[in-house]
Image (cartoon, rainbow, N blue to C red):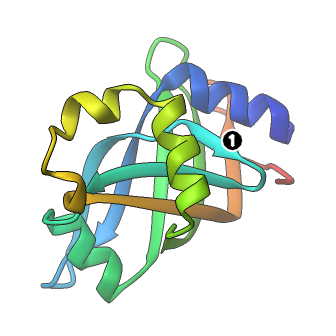
Amino acid sequence: MNRDEAIAYIKDAEFGYLATTGADGAPRVRPVGMDTVYGDAIYFFTFRNTRKVAEITANPQVEVVWSKPGTMSQVRVRGAMVEETDPEVQGHFKADNPMVAKLLPPGAEMLFLLYKLVPETVEAAATLAPYDQVVW
């Protein structure tokens, strides 16, 4: 699988599973709607008051896996999660993801937090085959 195929896979899968490290050192995994890619980064938004924000702040190293159970395939991305503060990128993200407006009612704008993940390692597996490194 190449980079373009990995991006197409991520967009098709739509939801990934984000792994962070909890305050107690234990892994924490949750589904995230993370399929927006600009340049070399993958973006997702969350509410500023969630537990994952505290976990990412304490340890920005994360891993996200997108899978398609019917094919037993997956794409895994590991790297450091960074807050995206550029208003232009935030505006572009909101325009490309109209569900953000539905989730953020008027007056709740201060809860919006956009993260970007620039992949350090990307792996893909088709069916139950071993992982292949993907050049990002």
Q: Residue 52: x percent and y percent?
A: 23, 66
Which quadrant of the figure contains the N terminus? Answer: top right
Element carrying mark 1 = strand
Task: Judge left or right: residue 48 versus residue 15.
Answer: left
Task: Judge left or right: residue 63 versus residue 56.
Answer: right
Write the residue at 86% across / 38% down: 2
Count the marks: 1
Is 27 or 105 nearer to us in this picture? 105
Q: Residue 44: x percent and y percent?
A: 44, 49
Write the residue at 82% across / 54% down: 136
Relative to 63, say whether 2 is above or below: above
Q: Residue 85: x percent and y percent?
A: 50, 70
Relative to 53, say whether 87 is above or below: above
Callout 1, which amino acid? Ala
Write the residue at 70% across / 47% down: 38
Write the residue at 33% across / 27% down: 99
Question: Which residue ends up furthest to the front in the rendered image?
Answer: 106
Task: Judge left or right: residue 1 versus residue 47.
Answer: right
State which quadrant residue 105 falls in.
Answer: top left
What residue is shown with label 1? 124
Using the rendered image of the protein, determine whether residue 1 is visible from the camera's viewpoint: no
Relative to 99, say whether 61 is above or below: below
Mark 1 closeness class: few <14, some 14–19, many ≥20 residues within 10 Å: many
Is 94 or 22 nearer to us in this picture? 94
Is 73 or 89 nearer to us in this picture? 89
Q: Residue 40: x percent and y percent?
A: 76, 56
Is 5 or 112 nearer to us in this picture? 112
Using the rendered image of the protein, determine whether residue 102 is visible from the camera's viewpoint: yes
